[in-house]
């Protein structure tokens, strides 16, 4: 509910009480004032979403208060009420910032129309304010690829998108899980409603509950104003919970309630807020293993995993590499103003040989770097790509090859067969060693977030002192 707190500024007691009762019946918090001074006292104590303001008041003109309100950093929408309406008066009020203009006496239907307009306007403003700060380099790009796994993925997206089902998208970092989520949104009946993304791994643990569910003024230190959470902003649309495995057990319990009951309470609040959202979650972990280790709630996993979608890693669809590389080459050639003719035969061979532990994101970065380093009119060469030869394949490669009957890298017929967990541990520690202990660089090589790397190291019992500090490079 974008509109919650309303002030009625009206000196006529009968009109004021009647309007107050109508608004309370619609479950709004209402404050009544008969003078401008009383209204200013309310405004000094709290922020309000909407005001009904009479023009003629005992201690001044309501239009003067309207002009004063425009200077407030957080200002309510103002509906001007008058019994002496004219076109000139209405135009003047709108010019001074009024949201609507009502001539007394007005009907319940007119109040309903005004409230609906105010609710929708406030929701759009808040969603647009949030989206204006969002960074999404991937938005607008299609699911590229001509391989059988990609064609199957596109067919599955088309089938699932038209439903309201909760979707869990699984896959390694860099495979394009967010692109799949956006494709589900674009092809769904909710495509004209908001699409709100939450990067669970990037939000500090002490703030993620507030980001999810919002907070009331004074709920904690620094909560100077009421704030709607991402679920409220996504009302009527779709919310993407990116890297859902990173949230704490406490937030998992509250998220489960939202999925079950479709309602929430803000941090520090007692009001129950109904939300209508479609939930799409992504993870680069095996959530079944996290459930077994008691790191992730089993009941929440079942709620999220209504429709599972797996995005195959790039090494399992290498026939897509030439097509993707060419698409990225043209894209970055336009972006950077470089005239690149083609990818050389040797360059294509190098792309096919590479293991791509960072998947499509790594290929995308390699092609952008190659375009920048390539001279105008030249073909992209192996040297432009900057690929590290002989990179150790990640644990998932070892697991896949072992399942296929081929010995994983670093093992032989007489060697001990390692578990996937041990292979993952060795690969992560090898990346740290390769990065001289720098966790930020190691995370980039592995295609995971620093937070995920830090969690893995805690699992392995590797102390922070064993590695160098993280940086922002």
Image (cartoon, grey):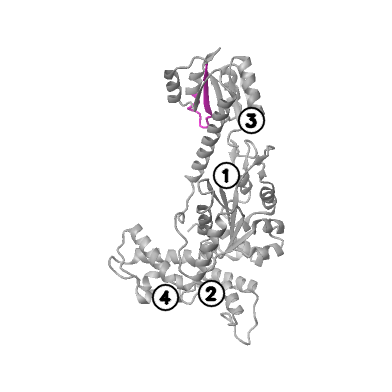
Determine contact: label 4, label 3, CB under 8 Å.
no
Q: Which residue is mark 2?
A: 393
Indicate whether residue 85 is drawn in magenta: no
Callout in the foreground (1, 4): 1
- Give how far across and how far down residue 182 sits, in percent: 51, 55
Q: Reading the chain from its start, which is encountered first: label 4 or label 3?
A: 3
Foreground residue, 10 or 384?
10
Give SS at disc 3. Answer: loop
Q: Which residue is mark 1?
A: 236
Determine contact: label 2, label 3, CB under 8 Å.
no
- Give how far across and how far down residue 159 sits, in percent: 55, 59
Q: Which residue is mark 4?
A: 350
Determine contact: label 3, label 1, CB under 8 Å.
no
Residue 468 appears anywhere in the view: yes
Q: Reading the chain from its start, which is encountered first: label 3 or label 1?
A: 3
Q: CA distance from mark 2 to mark 1?
A: 43 Å
Indicate whether residue 75 is drawn in magenta: yes
The residue at 47%/73% (across/down) is: 318
- Where does the N terminus fall, quadrant-wise? top right
Q: CA distance from mark 3 to mark 1?
A: 20 Å
Give the quadrant of residue 402.
bottom right
Q: Reading the chain from its start, which is encountered first: label 2 or label 4?
A: 4
Q: Does 229 sit left or right of 250 as displayed?
A: left
Query: Which span of residues is magenta-colored?
Result: 68-82
Q: Which residue is mark 3?
A: 28
């Amino acid at each position: 509910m974008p509109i919650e707190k309303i002030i009625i500024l009206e000196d006529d007691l009968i009109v004021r009480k009647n309007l107050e009762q109508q608004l309370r019946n619609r479950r709004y918090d209402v404050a009544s004032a008969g003078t401008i001074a009383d209204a200013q006292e309310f405004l000094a104590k709290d922020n309000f979403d909407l005001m009904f303001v009479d023009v003629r008041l005992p201690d001044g003109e309501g239009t003067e208060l309207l002009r004063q309100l425009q200077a407030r950093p957080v200002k309510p929408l103002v509906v001007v009420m008058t019994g002496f309406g004219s076109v000139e008066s209405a135009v003047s009020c709108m010019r001074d910032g009024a949201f609507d203009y009502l001539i007394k006496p007005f009907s319940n239907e007119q109040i309903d129309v005004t409230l609906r307009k105010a609710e929708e306007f406030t929701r759009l403003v808040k969603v647009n304010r949030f989206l204006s700060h969002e960074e999404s380099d991937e938005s607008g790009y299609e699911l590229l690829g001509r391989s059988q796994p990609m064609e199957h993925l596109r067919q599955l997206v088309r089938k699932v998108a038209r439903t309201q089902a909760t979707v869990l998208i699984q896959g390694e970092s860099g495979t394009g899980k967010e692109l799949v989520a956006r494709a589900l949104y674009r092809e769904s009946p909710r495509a004209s409603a908001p699409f709100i993304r939450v990067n669970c791994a990037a939000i500090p643990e002490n703030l993620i509950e507030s980001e999810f569910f919002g907070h009331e003024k004074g709920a904690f230190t620094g909560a100077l104003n009421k704030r709607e959470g991402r679920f409220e902003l996504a009302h009527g649309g779709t919310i993407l919970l990116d890297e859902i495995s990173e949230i704490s057990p406490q937030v998992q319990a509250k998220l489960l309630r939202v999925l079950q009951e479709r309602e929430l309470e803000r941090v520090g609040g007692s009001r129950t807020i109904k939300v209508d959202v479609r939930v799409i979650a992504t993870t680069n972990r095996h959530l079944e293993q996290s459930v077994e280790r008691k790191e992730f709630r089993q009941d929440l996993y079942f709620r999220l995993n209504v429709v599972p979608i797996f995005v195959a890693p790039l090494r399992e669809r290498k026939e897509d590499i030439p097509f993707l590389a060419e698409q990225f080459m043209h894209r970055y050639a336009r972006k950077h103003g470089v005239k690149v003719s083609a990818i050389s035969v040797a360059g294509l061979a190098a792309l096919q040989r590479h293991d791509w532990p960072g998947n499509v994101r790594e290929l995308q970065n390699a092609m952008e770097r190659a375009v920048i380093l390539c001279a105008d009119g030249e073909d992209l060469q192996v040297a432009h790509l900057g690929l590290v030869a002989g990179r150790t394949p990640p644990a998932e490669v070892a697991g896949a090859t072992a399942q296929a009957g081929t010995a994983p890298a670093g093992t032989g017929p007489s060697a001990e067969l390692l578990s996937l967990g041990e292979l993952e541990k060795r690969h992560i520690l090898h990346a740290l060693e390769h990065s001289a202990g720098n966790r930020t660089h190691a995370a980039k090589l592995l295609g995971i977030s620093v937070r995920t790397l830090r969690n893995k190291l805690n699992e392995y019992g590797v102390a922070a002192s064993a590695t160098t500090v993280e940086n922002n490079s």
